Amino acid sequence: MAAFMGDSSSGTCTYPGTWNPGTWNSNASDTVLKLVTYDNGTYTSSDAQVYLNPQTFTPYYLSSTGSAYERTIDIEWQTNNLRGDITCPAWYAPAGYTVSNSFIYNTSSNSWSDVYPVKSAKERMREALRSRLAGPAIITRKFIRTPDDIRETRARDALRRILGEEKYRNFLKNGFVTARNPRSGYVYQIFHERNRFVRVFKDGKCVERLCIHLQHGFTPTDFVITMYLMALNNDKDIWKTANKQGRSINREPSPANYNSVSLPELFRQFKKVG
Amino acid sequence: MKVTVFEKSVKKEVKIPTSLRVLGDSEKVPAGCSIFSILNQEDGDKRIVWDSRNLAEIRDAKDLFDQLIAEGMRPYVVGSDGQKTKEIMTIFDPVAEEVLMGDAPESEIVFTPQKALVGG
């Protein structure tokens, strides 16, 4: 049974690097097979091999279809990797051949019938029951997880010294720090999470959202330190650099999505589908 | 010993003078020493100590300070434990109250890569 649907995407990826597989709909913990067509330009040997990051892809092989320049590979990976960036393959060429340092990928959703396994109605029912054990919760803040990267650990040590224990604990719990500039009176809410706007408050109201980030591979906490110190001292430079996104719309927190269908009805639906 | 201020594509390496020491992760700051904290993306932030009673080290610290500023880093004087005010240090002043420390350093100079900030 086809349980996955993916959108087609294409582009050029320089290796080593990452590419994003796009948006995928899937059942959790299923394993899927995906076709990627690549074109490495100068490599003509039929013995081409594609080595994939074993942490991201399992297992891998190169099929023999396609012309010398264009081949189709089947990549299998776990669905928990689908929404992140994927490390692109490393290329290995026999002596005497050259490989260009980029490849063109072209993903398609044509092969999505190769999908397994699908959860049974019983398993899905069990999940539905589990989700109803507790009431709906509203979670608006994300705590910060322990870092795997030593660079991030060192950056957090620096932030801890700058903020002090109490503020640092709040930062870990809430995922952001706030800094008030004494001259302008603006309060800046700086998030650790990447891709979030810096929110600017005045007299308790959000007046602006600023889009700004650090280039050149600095850790998220390095960004927090830089923004925190700038917000306290030279917030004019933040305004000069950032893109202004306008005031946020004050949204009321909405309760978590709670399925109100009765359990017998839900089970009938699962049986019908599965 | 070097610090890489920006990424390899725009690599800017600043050589740390041999008289200055890079502190280990859990190492405490020796008495009478002052600290530079440099946000560094290559292998993590670095703490560099120099003896504020030693003229040669002060001179080397000034050189390092000037080089880092020339590479686009911005220095802030930061009180430890969030207690003191933070301010930008535009010119290296080894006898400034914040820099010349007693037995237990109460503040450090944090270099931030402000040049690497871009609007999204």
Image: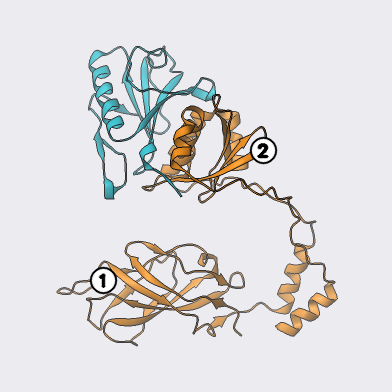
Question: In cyan, which chain?
Answer: B
Question: In orange, which chain?
Answer: A
Residue A84 location in percent, x, y?
49, 62
Q: Quadrant of residue A198?
A: top right
Looking at the rendered image, the quarter that the C terminus of chain A falls into is bottom right
Residue at (44%, 69%) from the top-left corner?
A57
How many C-alpha atoms fall within 10 Å of the one at disc 1: few (<14), some, or many (≥20)?
A: some
Q: Can residue A35 be seen in this view?
A: yes
| Residue B107: assigned label | none
Residue B23 location in percent, x, y?
35, 29
**Element carrying mark 1:** strand
Residue at (26%, 66%) from the top-left corner?
A101
Residue A139 location in percent, x, y?
69, 50
Residue B29 location in percent, x, y?
40, 22
Q: Is A172 located above or below residue B101 in the figure?
A: below
Chain of the residue that carries numbered disc 1 in the rendered image: A
Q: Mark 1: which amino acid?
A: Tyr
How many C-alpha atoms fall within 10 Å of the one at disc 2: few (<14), some, or many (≥20)?
A: few
Q: How far apart are marks 1 and 2 (CA)?
A: 56 Å
